[in-house]
Amino acid sequence: MVKRNEPLVTHIYTADPSAHVFEGKLYIYPSHDLDHEKESNDNGDQYDMEDYHVLSMEDADAPCVDHGEALHVRDVPWAKQQLWAPDAAFKNDTYYLFFPARDGQDVFRIGVATSQSPSGPFKPEPDYIPGSFSIDPAVLVDDDDQAYMYFGGLWGGQLEKWQTGEFLQDADGPAPSEPALGPRVARLTDDMLTFADAPKEILILDENGEPLLAGDEARRYFEGPWVHKHGGLYYLSYSTGSTHRIVYATSVDPEGPFQYRGVILTPVIGWTTHHSIVRFKERWYLFYHDSSLSGGADNKRCVKFTELLYNEDGTIRTIDPYDN
Ligand code: FUB
């Protein structure tokens, strides 16, 4: 087990790590938390990030390199503020950075920027992806080269406001006894710049084949989706938000339905928890964040990683981030 529970970098605050193997190295695409004081609220106003830095590591025990600013909100024509959790993908000999931000109407949308290098700088498209909304894009390029974007987050991420397909400012989430809201999935067009079809809601089922309920806060979807493949199954993992866990569900179909399977990561220091899972040199790793570097400030987080292990039956062993 290498580098467990240590911040990857300490000269800046980082969060929401999306890890990929590009050009034989580990590349990490985190949010860049700013060292400023903001009022904390359920709207997420304290997460007032302005740019992205790309990190990389030659190996799991090598130093982590900060490649500097890869994209700034001032260079994104449609975006007003709050660059939240990004992801990256490689296709068409091009690196794509997918990122959420609030537009001029304060509505979260998802944009894309491109580069010839995994470390950027990235050039943003002039407008957000048509039909995109909410936060936390995660892109899987499947073995047949079809790319899927998974996205969506409750509360500050505004997913509740899109239940009718239109943005309704005052919409609340479902009652506790009703099915929970699921993340959305959309196939991307071959050029990776638009949705091939309208986003669909992903169903997450319990052990009886019933949808998880909105009141089931220990298991229901909140934000931060990530999909990886292992043993012929698609693993959808996500944050439960108010109960601060990373959990997972599996399916034979990238668009679901998924069945709930268990807990990957127990709560970390700080309110948010956000992760990614990547295979690198025959081992699996969980990248995550906590607020330990700032002594617990919710909006000043640090990215860490640890090895992730499967059981024989394909279930994932639960990780306690402070069990060294
Ligand atoms: O970093 C801002 C937001 O906090 C992310 O988009 C969420 O997933 C949560 O980590």
Image: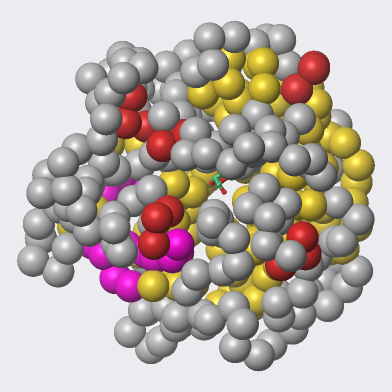
Q: Does any portion of residue 267 appear in the rendered image?
A: yes
Q: Position of residue 182 (x, y in %)?
A: 29, 43
Q: Position of residue 287 (x, y in %)?
A: 63, 64
Q: Position of residue 248 (x, y in %)?
A: 37, 64
Q: Is residue 315 left or right of residue 75?
A: left
Q: Quadrant of ligand 1?
A: top right
Whether residue 303 is in magenta: the answer is no
Q: Which residues are magenta?
A: 244-262
Count of numbered marks: 0
Q: Camera-side residue: 118 or 285?
A: 285
Where, by quadrant of the figure, is residue 170 drawn?
Answer: top left
Q: Position of residue 289 (x, y in %)?
A: 65, 61
Whether residue 260 is in magenta: the answer is yes
Q: Give the image's coloring scheme.
A: secondary structure
Residue found at x 59% / y 41%: 40
Q: Camera-side residue: 217 or 316?
A: 217
Q: Is residue 95 left or right of residue 12?
A: left
Q: Does any portion of residue 279 appear in the rendered image?
A: no
Q: Is residue 317 left or right of residue 254?
A: right
